Image (tube, rainbow, N blue to C red):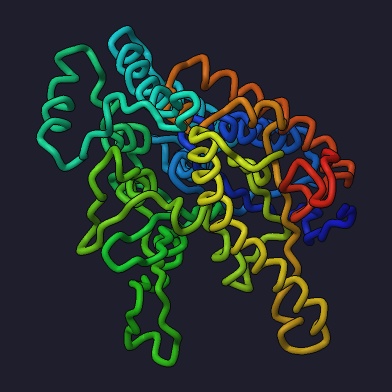
């Protein structure tokens, strides 16, 4: 258990928060972030500077939506769009998700049909172990899906319900028309996506907009970056198209085109991106808090097709994240080992911590429930997130919060004992 925390000159800990994707399960992160923002607001109002300062946010897929709304609410945008505050971030985050769920009769029916299609496809014929083929999945490039989508408004379904880009443009107009006061933005935002044709791991980074740093299109070496290594990854400016790219599940949406690149969900690359937080040695956070949606562990080997599909999806989301977290842990080890040499002096340790669902809540969820956009599902997970964050923050303020990698799971590896 990590008890010591680095204090800055102002007495605060610099914290970055990473939000995993997971469809409607990310409503848990809505509750977590709401509670964290309230804590920040209350302590700031009381003049308490012994807590933490939010310097970074990151997210992938639905986690990107959470991170974006908080970042947008905090960002200074002028009188027309709001000056930026913790309360503004709370309101923006929760109002967005209230709009994201099914709101009227037509959307409730559409959500029921969508969610139940995935749920029925999880059912397994007893004894022979074959999933029941129900409707199959529509090709997002096919004419049938185009016809269905075109008919939805006439049935009373809001365009914002099925058009992510329209929903984002209405939720974040200052970013859409470039009215952000970039000079005074104090919180960095990283959004993860996967470039389809070239296989580039892609991050849309607010720092490219704020500081004017060079874009880095994968495997290219601009003259300005002479001598720098090339990578199978990209660092591009933050945009609403980048957010939409991060949430483009290929079975439901066409690949998002930005310039000459095409993108799918960031789940395959990083869930969420965090490595960039330690790449700039001048602005490295003291702590990185991960809001984990996908359980790190299962209590048994999945045997039913439903459980196998669910665990496959969880592993995709966790293994990509853990690679980046384990790299940070390695840098911490190198910093300690070479603290008297140049590497040690140029780097500082970053404490990584996990905020996760209660085990029983996580076990009751499945792959299909990630597609359930009902208000009840959202509100239940949001409340769970608030309760979890409240208890977690109490421990953190008392220097009793545990740290990664031990706090990522529910059990110790050699036993079934639950890790508190």
Residue 83 lies, in percent from the top left, at 48, 39
Residue 155 lies, in percent from the top left, at 18, 12
Q: Is residue 152 left or right of residue 20?
A: left
Give the residue at the far top of this rendering: 105
Residue 173 sits in quarter: top left
Give the residue at the far bottom of this rendering: 227
Give the residue at the far front of this rendering: 127
Q: Look at the image and tell me whether residue 258 can be seen.
A: yes
Q: Is residue 400 left or right of residue 73?
A: right
| 345 and 255: which is toward the camera | 255
| 155 and 77: which is toward the camera | 155
Q: Which residue is drawn at 34% across and 43% down?
A: 249
Residue 291 sits above or below residue 378 on the image: below
Residue 385 sits in quarter: top right
Q: Which residue is drawn at 37% across and 58% down?
A: 194
Residue 187 sits above or below residue 131 on the image: below
Residue 198 lies, in percent from the top left, at 30, 68
Q: Look at the image and tell me whether residue 84 can be seen.
A: no
Q: Residue at x 33, y 72 (%)?
A: 217
Q: Which residue is drawn at 64% across and 21% down?
A: 383
Residue 420 sits above or below residue 207 on the image: above
Number of numbered tags placed on the structure image: 0
Quarter of the figure that contains the C terminus = top right
């Amino acid at each position: 258990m990590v008890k010591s925390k680095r204090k800055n000159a102002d007495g605060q800990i610099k914290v970055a928060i990473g939000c995993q994707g997971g469809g409607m399960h990310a409503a848990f992160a809505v509750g977590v972030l709401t509670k964290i923002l309230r804590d920040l607001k209350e302590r700031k109002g009381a003049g308490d500077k012994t807590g933490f300062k939010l310097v970074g946010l990151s997210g992938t897929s639905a986690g990107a939506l959470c991170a974006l709304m908080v970042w947008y609410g905090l960002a200074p945008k002028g009188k027309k769009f709001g000056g930026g505050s913790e309360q503004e971030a709370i309101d923006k985050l929760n109002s967005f998700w209230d709009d994201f769920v099914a709101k009227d009769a037509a959307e409730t029916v559409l959500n029921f049909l969508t969610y139940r299609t995935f749920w029925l496809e999880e059912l397994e014929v007893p004894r022979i172990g074959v999933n029941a083929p129900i409707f199959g999945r529509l090709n997002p490039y096919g004419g049938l899906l185009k016809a269905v989508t075109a008919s939805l408004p006439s049935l009373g379904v809001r365009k914002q319900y099925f058009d992510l880009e329209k929903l984002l443009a209405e939720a974040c107009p200052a970013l859409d028309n470039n009215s952000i006061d970039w000079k005074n933005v104090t919180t960095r935002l990283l959004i993860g996506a996967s470039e389809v044709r070239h296989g580039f791991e892609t991050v849309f980074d607010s720092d490219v907009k704020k500081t004017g740093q060079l874009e880095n299109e994968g495997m290219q070496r601009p003259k300005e970056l002479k001598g720098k290594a090339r990578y199978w990854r990209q660092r591009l400016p933050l945009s609403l198209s980048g957010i939409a790219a991060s949430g483009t599940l290929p079975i439901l949406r066409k690949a998002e085109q930005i310039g000459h690149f095409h993108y799918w969900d960031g789940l395959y690359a990083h869930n969420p991106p965090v490595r960039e937080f330690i790449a700039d040695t001048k602005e490295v956070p003291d702590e990185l808090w991960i809001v984990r949606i996908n359980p790190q562990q299962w209590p048994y080997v999945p045997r039913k097709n439903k459980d196998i599909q669910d665990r496959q999806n969880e592993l995709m989301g966790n293994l990509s994240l853990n690679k980046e977290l384990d790299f940070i842990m390695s840098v911490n080890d190198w910093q300690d080992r070479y603290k008297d040499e140049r590497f040690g002096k140029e780097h500082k340790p970053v404490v990584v911590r996990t905020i996760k669902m209660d085990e029983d809540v996580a076990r009751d969820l499945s792959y299909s429930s990630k597609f359930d956009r009902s208000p009840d599902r959202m509100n239940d997970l949001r409340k769970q997130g608030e309760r979890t964050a409240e208890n977690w923050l109490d421990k953190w303020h008392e220097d009793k919060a545990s740290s990664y990698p031990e706090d990522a799971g529910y059990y110790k590896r050699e036993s079934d004992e639950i890790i508190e």
